[in-house]
Amino acid sequence: MNEEGISSLTDICTTWICHYVEVLCVSQKDGSLQIRHCPLFPQELADQLLHKMADEGVLDDKTVGIFQNPEALRLRRAYIRSSRVSAEAFRLSLCPHKLQELNASHIHSDITISDILHNLSSNKDCRQGLHTLLMNGLNLYGETGELVRARFRVLRGLKNLSVAWTDLDDTGLEDICSLPLLESLDVSGTNVTDLTPLLNCQSRLRSLTVHGLQKLEMSTAGLLSVLDKLHVLRHLDISNDRLVTDVDNLVHQLLERTGVFPHLVSLDVSGWRGVSDAAVRAFVEARPGMRFIGLLATGADGSELMSTGGNLKVAGEANLTQVCEALRRYSEQESLLREVLVHLYKYTSEMERSQPNTLKLVSDGMRHHTDSLHVQLVATACVFNLTTLELVLGMPLHLLETVVQQLLTAMKNFPNHKQLQKNCLLTLCSDHILQVVSFDRYEATKLMMMFLENHEDQTLQRMAVAVVSILVAKLSTEEISELGAEAFIMKQLLSIVQQKASQGVVDSTLKFALSALWNLTDETPTACRHFIQCQGVELYMELLESYFSESSIQQKLLGLLNNVAEVEELRVKLQDEELVEHLLTLLINPAVDVDVSYFAGGILAHLASSVGPVWGLDAGLHRTVLDKLHSSILTWSLPQGVMVSYRTFQPFYQLLHVSQYSGVQLWALWAVQLVCSQKAAQYCSMLHTEGGTDRLKVLSSHPDTHSDVKSLADNILTILEQYLNLVGPGSKHHDAVLNGT
């Protein structure tokens, strides 16, 4: 993916394979998968596919089985970080390959460092050719310990090794330092107490990272004595994850040393408080080849170093450039990341331009520490600052997709932390994010509803309901049906409506909740049943009375009742004389907005229909309803903007049957005319595809059809004909209408 967020063809293809890997494969006896008719992959492509499977979270014992075919899928650089691959699957699928690099950090299984070493050593090519091995975050041995404990020294070709945040001890370090080609070593956060074994590789060790060695028992003089002898060292990281004062003057003494580290290009002392600018400046000036220095949480400014015009990069807090460099360097180090995010929040509080690179760095940090409340809390606040108002418009969509997923993960992991939830909701309450960015809206809606069930804070409630309202409107019919099956969702939204109604307020929370309920019941009989079971009809009758002068509220109330009326077996629940009388008032009152009258007429048309449950109220009332439907609809004029949208015209077709009452037919025809006249491209095609055009022709030509009905049906057929003439033969819309496809 390039800087503009455009995916390469390779990235698109490998992502597609990840999503459909089980479809492309057959299962083996051991449950693993094998690609059907697997072609010979270019070697680099096989590496990329494995990497993508790990990134997409689909790499496990089952899917990694496709790499048991080393003839077709040849691996050299294997990336299985954060996957769910067991020791046995690792042995069968990856060890037969001639691996040169392996990143097996933070694997979510019981695989151990010993397992990996033992299995790799079984392959001669790996013993000699593997030069880079990362196993951060793993245990050295299993809970019971291995009978035969594998050693690092068997991998004679290793040049770069990282075993940070493992239980590596002094014995393990001695074993590592016997590797004949070792050049780079990271033992951060391990149980090592003595670094003296490093002297065994002093003539070849070029990079050493010993961040957060809290169990180190060496004196300052002893440690410096060892470091002094690493003559070819180019990269040194002695940063401290505790962010404490350097009481033993380790950093101060190191910076003052002359004649050592002549080839050093990077030094990291972040986390050691009490470092002076003068000492840092003198150290850097004595080594003109320096390209990086880490000074976060040291007290040293470092800004003068960056103004010298050289290529030196500083990870610190003096300015946004330093902060971003720290973000990039410390995304996997929780304490330092938390520190730098606090400073980033300060710098992003008044951003004027979009900073996609900074947002990506924050997202990377969130991804690496999903279980850290401290990281997620500050990071979500930074995300809000970076995406607020128009800033979000300058962010690549693919980046926003990742960020939204991180926000939803944070909300799921810390459901009871009010401030974190607020941070996430503030960002998600963006039309651009909710309408344009691609993410799993169905799961997001469920998450928001669970949030509403557990939080009564009015501010948080308002934001969550707003998000739900917009998300539900973007769901497919199938997804809405699944949501509608969740009775607690209906109950929770109605509870919010009841709460607002009892206060007599008209605010955004009430409007969003009503919109969500309206969308939730659209073509969803199950949701409509839940609405009735939760005494929704009784509540809505009260609201129709109390919010009589609020047109926007009336429209949402009547829109939902229309959805209920479309379900034949539920119409009897709406056959209430008081409700029908009120709907008649809304239908015929000239002071009522046409959109309100329209929805009131829709409910009455379904209730008075000759199809479905028999009218159970007074016969005279039935005649009045039909008469008023007919006469009132003839007085309506089409509004300027479309006030309603439809996924299908199916609910209208039974109202257009030749045996229907004319008032019922007129309402359905007026609705079809409304949308076809204003969004012809969408609705003319839909009408013909569903067979509606033929129904209109039958209705128009039938001898018993009322003249008013015939006139309106002919109007719609004319709109259809005009549309076809406009788009012309051969256009996709023209062909769709003609072919019914």
Image (tube, rainbow, N blue to C red):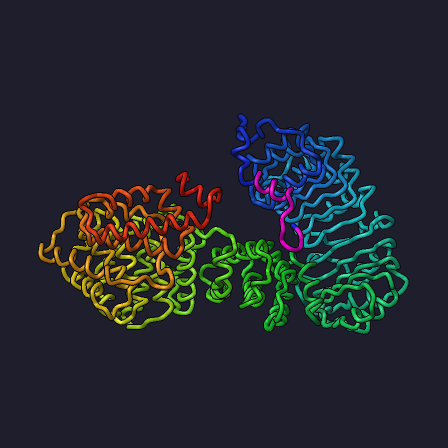
Q: Percent position (x, y) of residue 77? A: 71, 40
Residue 404, compared with residue 88, is above or below; it is below
Q: Is residue 468 left or right of residue 620?
A: right
Residue projecting furthest to the right = 259
Please give the name of the residue rendered at 68% of the width and 44% of the height, measured from the top-left corner. Answer: 103
Number of marks? 0
Residue at horizontal 63 percent and vertical 66 percent from the top = 339
**Residue 198 in sight:** yes
Closer to the camera in the image, 230 or 640: 640
State the residue in front, 417 or 360.
360
Hey, which quadrant is residue 240 in on the image?
A: bottom right
- Residue closer to the observer: 231 or 463: 463
Q: Quadrant of the C terminus?
A: top left
Compare residues 451 and 429 and report the one nearer the observer.
Answer: 429
Whether residue 194 appears in magenta in the rendering, the answer is no
Q: Which residues are magenta?
A: 2-17
**Quadrant position of residue 320:** bottom right
